[in-house]
Image: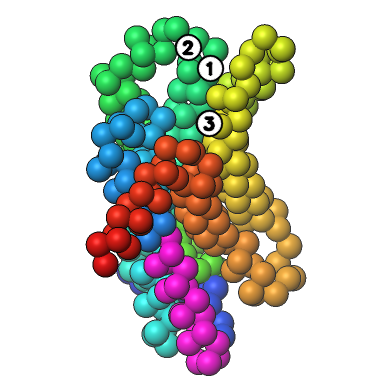
Amino acid sequence: MDNVSVTSLLILLGLNCTVEQKVTLFSLTLLCYLIIWILNIVLIVTIIVDKSLHEPMYIFLCNLCISGLYGTSGFYPKFLLDLLSPSHVISYAGCLLQSFVIHSSTGCDLSILAVMAYDRYVAICRPLVYHSVMTKQRVSLLVFFSWLLPLYCMFMNTVTISQSKLCGSHIHKLYCSNWLIGKIACSVTTANSAIVYFNIAFYASHSFFIAWSYIYLIRMCIKPQTNSSKFMQTCVPHLLSLFTYSFAVILELMYMRFGPRDVSQSLQNFMAIQFLIFPPILNPLIYGLKLTKIRNRILEQQFHQTFLF
């Protein structure tokens, strides 16, 4: 057991395909990653360059896109290298880092979505005090803590799991996660278990707040005297983004813990990575097409570049 516990290399077992399949998968994966970068960078640059978009809603959206790029950077580069390599190994430290990046990004997404729900609640339900509530200082604090708290929670989780001795070296997935590292650990510390339950409660409170905010907003907009145009224009993209995120993450979590193992490896891989595909692609598309100011600004830039060319 002592010899196994000092294992420095872990083996990722999720990728089992022929050379021809690897070439096709590499091309599709690289194309997907490029699309993610292009879509999110276009939205980020548009918001940063255009001063008229320096409003709380667009600032939060910019951070949501940055979080998407941050999370996908923990998976795609390593996966692309694995497709070019005959062996799919990763160092223990690299495994912990990959798990930290992917799952802290997921936490940042949820925190930013919660902040966006609060922003829409104030804008629609308390419009007269919106600018006095959503000041630059408060927006900066909300952005700061929407990054700090998920990073800190995941950091503590990673630190406690890293202190566990390993009794195995096989990760049955395309990428690392603390859950799977814990399964090959000889034992899990009490501190790690406590932090895991705290993180679950912490993010569950985010989910309840988001659900309460949008239920309240929908009830407000049903009233005849309420102008529902602002809700349809700004909240519908948030709801679509929230649905995409929730569906992808919950599906991955439920399948990882309770899913059957007698299904094909391809389906298992797809279930494991779909939250790294759909939200990062759909979020900039949803907001870029639905929010008028962003859509018009992108079209203006495209027209200007075409005219100059």
Q: Quadrant of residue 130?
A: top left
Picture coordinates of residue 92 (x, y %)? 35, 64
Q: Is residue 296 above or below residue 28?
A: above
* Disc 3 packing (10 Å; few <14; some 14–19; many ≥20): some
Residues at marks 2 and 1, CA–CA distance in whole angstroms: 6 Å
Residue at x-position 47% and y-position 12%? 127
- Which residue is under mark 2? 127
Q: Quadrant of residue 265?
A: bottom right
How are the colours assigned in the image? rainbow
- Which residue is under mark 1? 124
Residue type (three-letter) at the residue carrying disc 3: Thr
Residue type (three-letter) at the residue carrying disc 1: Ile
Give the dominant element type of the magenta stretch: helix, strand or loop.
helix
- Please indicate, yes or no, whether residue 1 appears anywhere in the rendered image: no
- Which range of residues does the magenta coloring cover? 18-36
Q: Which mark is residue 234?
A: 3
Picture coordinates of residue 307 (x, y %)? 30, 61
Q: Is residue 1 magenta?
A: no
Q: Secondary structure at mark 3?
A: helix
Q: Earlier in the sequence, mark 3 or mark 2?
A: 2
